[in-house]
Structure formats: structure tokens, C-alpha cells
Image (cartoon, grey):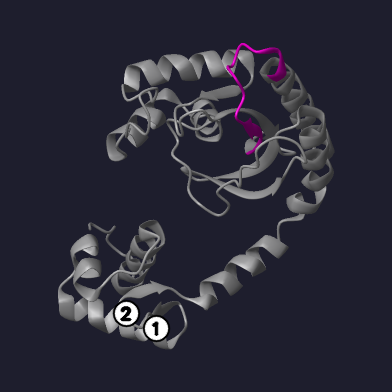
Amino acid sequence: MEHETGKVKSLWKAIDILDALTAARRGLSLSELAVQCGFPKSTTHALASTMRDRGLIRQLPDGSYAPGMRLFEYGAAVSRGFDISALARPYLENLSSLTGANSVISLFDGENAVSFDYAVSSSGIQILPEIGVRLPLHCTSQGKLMLAFLLPQKVRSICKRRTLRAYTPHTITDADKLLQQLSEIREQGYAVEDGEYKVGLRSVSAPVFDADGTVRYALTTIGFFRRVSSDDFTNAVQVTVKQAQTLSEVLG
């Protein structure tokens, strides 16, 4: 992997290892880790050994490597620092109550959309949101909402660097079509996912603005709605947009 000049290369490599282990969602052998990161096996072993000793990664009984508990501790510390979690909790719970579906709040961090809190509805099939995971930008309502508020040239740059993977037959994999949809999202003020990430799953995300007027978060309703034109989904859109607007006023 290429790294910018002037950076601490060993730290970049350590982060590459953490990224590979996090994305794998299973243990990776030393050889697999070296191949995925593009490092010599000796370099990978030295980095992995150091990171294991500091608790950043752990070694499983079969010798493979996985993320360590210290990462959980770091994540918990970051989560405690998000006052937005406490502020958003009533809106998440109210959203789930009004729609009968699950609600999620995500953070826009650079070029990533990461969900960090949710509320589960007491009715219907339960869906556990992916918390702390980088969401695909081109096929989730949170990701598309984030892209919609970026400059078109920035979106094209992201599309060139990230594969527009087809998760389902409904996933948009053409950059021009995606840009067209992003324009519609900006105009209507919310983004919809219609079975593009997971078959049968539909969601709507509305922007939450901070005090500077920047879109920092997405408030999302997600569930197995029959179709995006159904009355229950239309209600979910209206309620989600309203709750996001109210939360934006609180943050402003």
C-alpha cells in the first residue's frame, strides 16, 4: 500500500493491519495478513508481535490474528465522548416508536459513514444495525446522504478509489447514475435505500446539521418495509425528516 511522504510509515502499516483484521471479521494467518497488506512476512510478523504485546490485536489458538480488547477500550472511550449519543437517544426511541421500525444514528467522518447508536422497535422483525462499521457509501441511505452533500468532483474521486460493488441486483454500480441520484437526494432532503445493500431491507436517512450548518450525522429508519411507495414507508420518511430537523435545531 502507498503512503504519503513525511508520514510515520510504521504507524501507517500498523493501521493497515488493523484495517485488514477489522474488515476480515475472522482471524487472519500471518501469511494472509502479509498478502492483504502487501508487506513482507518478516515486517508483518514484527508489527503483529508488537501490536499483540500492546493489546491492539490478539492471537487466536490456531495462531491467526484478530482485533484485540484494547481497541474495544478505545472505542468505548470515544463513544463516551460523543455527547450526541445522549442528545440523540430520545429522538432514536421516538423514531422507532412512531415508525415501528429500528432507528440508527451515524457519524460522517471524512469519507466514511459509521453508525454508532440505535434504538430497536418492539414490533416486527428485529434488525440489529451494524454499529462501528464503515458502511458502503453507494448503496446505503446513510452513505448516499453523505455523498450527496459533497462536491461532485469529490464524489467522483471517491468512486475511483472505491469499487462500487454490487451487493444486490439493485445496487447502483455506475458513477454517473449515482451522481444523478445524489442530485435528487440533495433536492428532496433525504436518501432512500431500496434493497441496494441487503435484499428486502429498506431505509430512509435524513441529515442532521451541526451548529455550523454542516451535515455531521444521519438519522435513519430501517426495516423490512414492503416497498418504498407503501404508506408505512412514506410515514417513515416524514417522521425521520422531522426528527432530524428537530435534532438539528437542538445542535444549532
Query: Which secondary structure, mark 1?
Result: helix
Mark 1–mark 2 distance (CA, rounded to whole Å): 6 Å
Task: From the viewer's side, name the closer residue of 62 and 70.
Answer: 62
Q: Is residue 240 above or below residue 89?
A: above
Q: Quadrant where the N terminus lies?
A: bottom left
- Amino acid at dot 2: Ala
Residue 3 placed where, x, y %? 27, 59
- Amino acid at dot 1: Arg
The quadrant in which residue 31 appears is bottom left
Residue 78, numbered circle: none
Question: Can the viewer see residue 72 in this picture?
Answer: yes
**Residue at the location (25% across, 68% down)?**
33
Q: Crowding at label 2, few (<14), some or many (≥20) Cα neighbours within 10 Å?
A: many
Task: From the viewer's side, name the closer residue of 148 and 140.
Answer: 140
Q: Crowding at label 1, few (<14), some or many (≥20) Cα neighbours within 10 Å?
A: some
**Residue at the location (71% across, 39% down)?**
210
Q: Is residue 69 above or below residue 242?
A: below
Q: Is residue 159 left or right of residue 87?
A: left
Residue placed under numbered mark 2 in the picture: 48
Residue 162 placed where, x, y %? 32, 39
Residue placed under numbered mark 1 in the picture: 52
Residue 233 placed where, x, y %? 67, 19
Question: Can the viewer see residue 247 in this picture?
Answer: no
Query: Which secondary structure, mark 2?
Result: helix
Residue 9 placed where, x, y %? 29, 70
Magenta-colored span: 217-232
The answer to whether residue 219 is magenta is yes
Answer whether labels 1 and 2 touch (C-beta < 8 Å).
yes
Task: From the viewer's side, name the closer residue of 210 and 40.
Answer: 40
Figure disc tally = 2
**Residue at the location (33% across, 64% down)?**
16
